[in-house]
Structures are given as structure tokens and as C-alpha cells.
Image (cartoon, grey):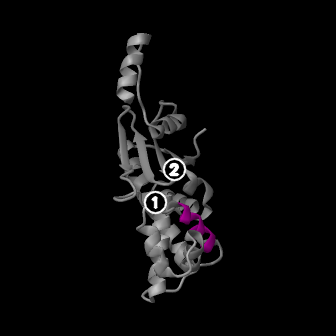
């Protein structure tokens, strides 16, 4: 549909019309299209997009919640839920996430969560990521480890494109990276360890 709209607009305007993703537009806000750069996005999902000096675009991640998006809110929420259930079974360390999961999904017992996850309605898995962040802030080690794991995934996405695009500018975008201090600090530390001269900032 977008392609058809662009074709029709081109005919009416008599000028080139380009259809780009929101990720590309945010990358453009970072670089102005004038220099190589990489943008890492972590909201509900996660991906990196980069542009080299020749204008070639590369992408890493963004495969969706079922097959990827490691480091995004859905991933963090899912990992938090899995940790909560393993703790409830006694096969993993106890964590504040178990009580948080019961409260978030409005059930009394861990086994009641099965009907939540496999019922007719889509459960709010990504929304649970904020409880992972809260539990981490309150000192829950399991929760903090999940956030650090997310940061590591995001760092790998960014690093592969920084190398590929030969970029010295990295933008960060999305609620996870822009609002979670634990993820952001760990992410930036990891990237700077590999690329000491990288400039990291939020796009205008």
C-alpha cells in the first residue's frame, strides 16, 4: 500500500517520492544524511540500523518478538517471566519477579499464569519489563542480570554495524535505552570498550 501511495504521489507531484521506515528517519535525524552513523533502537523490540559513507543501509536485529528482538522490552519482559516461573518451580534462584508477575497479570498462583499466556488475549509481556527494572532497582540480582543481558545484546547489534559502516557516531533511541539507566550504562560501557572514540547521543 505504501508503495502504491508513493507511486501515485510521484505521478501527481512530478517529483521523486521515497518511502522510508521510522528507523531510517530517526537515523537521518542523527546524521542529517551527511556522515556515517548507526542508530540502536530498544523499545518493545530492538534493532540497529546504520549508513556508511556511500549511503548504503545495513540492519541488525529487528526480527520480531518470536525470533529475536533481544534487548527490547518484550525480550526483557519474557526473560523476567521465565525467571519468575523457574523460581516458582524451585529449579532456579528465588526472585522478586515471581510476586511481581502475579501482581502484573492479576492472578494468585504461578500456575494460574498458564491461562494468561495461552488464553485468547495477547498478554502484556513487554509491559512486564518495567517490573524487571523496578525489581533490579530494589536489589533483585536476577532482574539486574536480565537487564545486563539485554544491554549485551544491544551492544552486539550496535558494534557489528559500527564496524561495517565505519561509523564514529552512535544514536540511541527507545524507552529501554533512554529511560533505563542500568541498560544504558552497561550498553555504553560495552560499546566504548570496543570503540573508544565513538560519540553516543540521542538524535535531535
Magenta stretch, main secondary structure class: helix
Q: Are marks 1 and 2 in contact (CB under 8 Å)?
A: no
Q: Residue at x 59, y 45 (%)?
A: 202
Which picture quadrant has residue 152?
A: bottom left
The answer to whether residue 168 of the structure is visible from this angle is: yes
Seen in the picture, residue 173 relative to 68 is either above or below; the reply is above
Q: Which residue is mark 2?
A: 197
Residue 143 in the magenta stretch? The answer is no
Which residue is nearer to you in this view: 63 or 34?
63
**Percent from the top left, x then y, of residue 97?**
55, 77
Which picture quadrant has residue 89?
A: bottom left
Q: Nearer the viewer, mark 1 or mark 2?
A: 1
- Viewport quadrant of the N terminus: top left
Which residue is nearer to you in this view: 117 or 126?
117
Q: Which mark is residue 122?
A: 1
Rate crowding at label 1 as few (under 14), some (14 to 19) or many (20 or more) other CA atoms within 10 Å: few
* Sooner in the amino-acid sequence: mark 1 or mark 2: 1
Rate crowding at label 2 as few (under 14), some (14 to 19) or many (20 or more) other CA atoms within 10 Å: few
Q: Secondary structure at mark 1?
A: loop
Instruction: Give me the C-alpha separation between circle 1 and circle 2.
Output: 43 Å
Residue 130 in the magenta stretch? The answer is yes
Please state if 129 lies on the left or on the right of 47 as rendered: right
Magenta residues, as a range? 127-135
**Percent from the top left, x then y, of residue 171?**
53, 46
Q: Residue at x 48, y 49 (%)?
A: 40
Amino acid at each position: 500500500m505504501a508503495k502504491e501511495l508513493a507511486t501515485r504521489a510521484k505521478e501527481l507531484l512530478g517529483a521523486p517520492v521515497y518511502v522510508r521506515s521510522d528507523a531510517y528517519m530517526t537515523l537521518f535525524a542523527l546524521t542529517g544524511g551527511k556522515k556515517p552513523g548507526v542508530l540502536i533502537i530498544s523499545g518493545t523490540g530492538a534493532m540497529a540500523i546504520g549508513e556508511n559513507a556511500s549511503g548504503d543501509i545495513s540492519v541488525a536485529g529487528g526480527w520480531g518478538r518470536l525470533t529475536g528482538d533481544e534487548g527490547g522490552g518484550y525480550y526483557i519482559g519474557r526473560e523476567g517471566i521465565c525467571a519468575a516461573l523457574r523460581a516458582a518451580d524451585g529449579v532456579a534462584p528465588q526472585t522478586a519477579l515471581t510476586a511481581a508477575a502475579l501482581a502484573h497479570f492479576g492472578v494468585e498462583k504461578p500456575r494460574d499464569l498458564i491461562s494468561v499466556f495461552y488464553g485468547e488475549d495477547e498478554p502484556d509481556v513487554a509491559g512486564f519489563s518495567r517490573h524487571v527494572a523496578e525489581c533490579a532497582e530494589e536489589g533483585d540480582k536476577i532482574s539486574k542480570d536480565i537487564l545486563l543481558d539485554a544491554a549485551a545484546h544491544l551492544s552486539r547489534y550496535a558494534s557489528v554495524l559500527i564496524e561495517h559502516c565505519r561509523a564514529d557516531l552512535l544514536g540511541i533511541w527507545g524507552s529501554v535505552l533512554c529511560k533505563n539507566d542500568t541498560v544504558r550504562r552497561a550498553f555504553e560501557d560495552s560499546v566504548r570498550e570496543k570503540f573508544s572514540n565513538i560519540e553516543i547521543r540521542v538524535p535531535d
